Amino acid sequence: MTIFPPDDVFEHLPHPALYWPARLWAAPSTDPQSNVAYQRTYPPGALPDTVATWEDGPHTLRVPTLRETTPLCRVTVATLPGGARIAIIEDVQEFHTDPLTGLLDRRALHHDLRTETPGSVVLLDIDDFKVVNDTLGHAAGDDVLRALGALLCATARHAGGRAYRLGGDEFLMHTTRPIATAPLEHMQQQFRQAARRLGIDGVGVSIGRAEAPQDGNTIEHLILHADAQLGDHKRDRPPQTARPRTTDRDATTSAASRSPRHWLGL
């Protein structure tokens, strides 16, 4: 069935959009009309078939694109005068992205907690990160964070998962399948090398891991389990202190207080 939009305004909307005429939007066999912006960005059927029946207002979900990405999008559904319905899609991925590392932020994690399968979780934080900030300054600390963010992003992409910066020097990776040990160890080694290139010796990254179902059957449970393991690893870690090559100043470090319950809103 061919559906005609109300006028040319729909066709030339700057945002991708779908349109259902009155009395036809609830028909299972009725395909919506898509505008040019939609056809250039999303494949047919990118949105669920039920979108035409959603409540008026904004809805946040991941929408697959023609570029084989699934950014977070805001889909605003509205009922037009006369009963026709329209859905306008806005890519809001950048508003859920950490500006320093380019990773997804904690708000994106909160969204994905509700929709992703448990799979595997890896928690990471940087050993002696306070020493880096105290001795070399926050600009050097930012360089270290960006280095870990880039390595974690590449590791997550290779594993078919997503990487997040939770805040400070705390990071998380989630995948829907088990995460092998070798890529994580390789990432740790690459991070130490990257820190040395930035002029810092003795800095590394600690890791806590959890997998479903043995460690929990929700992502929230996996995060709590991985956090406990991360704490154990940091306590058992051989004593070593990050030291910048540019100064002889003695440095000491204190473990940052961390609360996964705060991340999860528990």
Image (cartoon, rainbow, N blue to C red):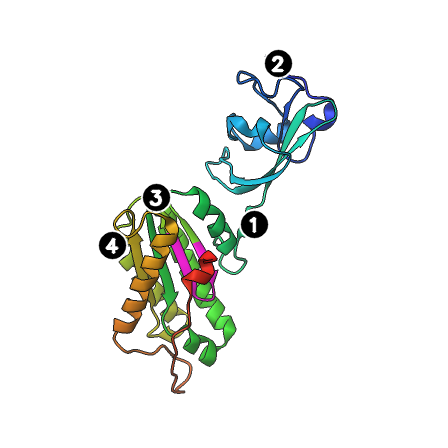
Q: Which residue is mark 3?
A: 176
Q: Are marks 3 and 2 in contact (CB under 8 Å)?
A: no
Q: Is residue 167 magenta?
A: yes
Mark 1–mark 4 Cα distance, whole angstroms, equals 31 Å
Residue under the image location 55 percent in, 46 percent down:
93
Q: Position of residue 187 (x, y in %)?
A: 32, 58
Q: What is the three-letter code of the residue carrying label 2?
A: Thr
From the image, which quarter does the N terminus lie in? top right
Occupied quadrant, residue 59: top right
Mark 3–mark 2 Cα distance, whole angstroms, equals 39 Å
Q: Earlier in the sequence, mark 1 or mark 2?
A: 2
> Which mark is on residue 182?
4
Mark 3–mark 1 Cα distance, whole angstroms, equals 23 Å
Q: Is residue 11 above or below residue 172?
A: above
> Mark 3 or 4, which is nearer the eye?
3
Mark 1–mark 2 Cα distance, whole angstroms, equals 35 Å
Q: Position of residue 28 (x, y in %)?
A: 53, 18
Is the residue marked by circle 3 packed among few (<14), some (14-19), or many (20+) residues within 10 Å?
some
Q: Which residue is mark 1?
A: 94
Q: Earlier in the sequence, mark 3 or mark 4?
A: 3
| Left or right of 129 in this view: 225 | left
Which residues fall within the magenta stretch?
Answer: 164-173
Residue 39 visible in this rendered orientation of the protein? no
> Which mark is on residue 2?
2
> Mark 3 or 1, which is nearer the eye?
3
Q: What is the three-letter code of the residue carrying label 1?
A: Glu
Q: What is the three-letter code of the residue carrying label 3?
A: Thr
Q: Is residue 162 above or below residue 132?
A: above
In this rendered view, identify the residue nearer to me: 74 or 228.
228
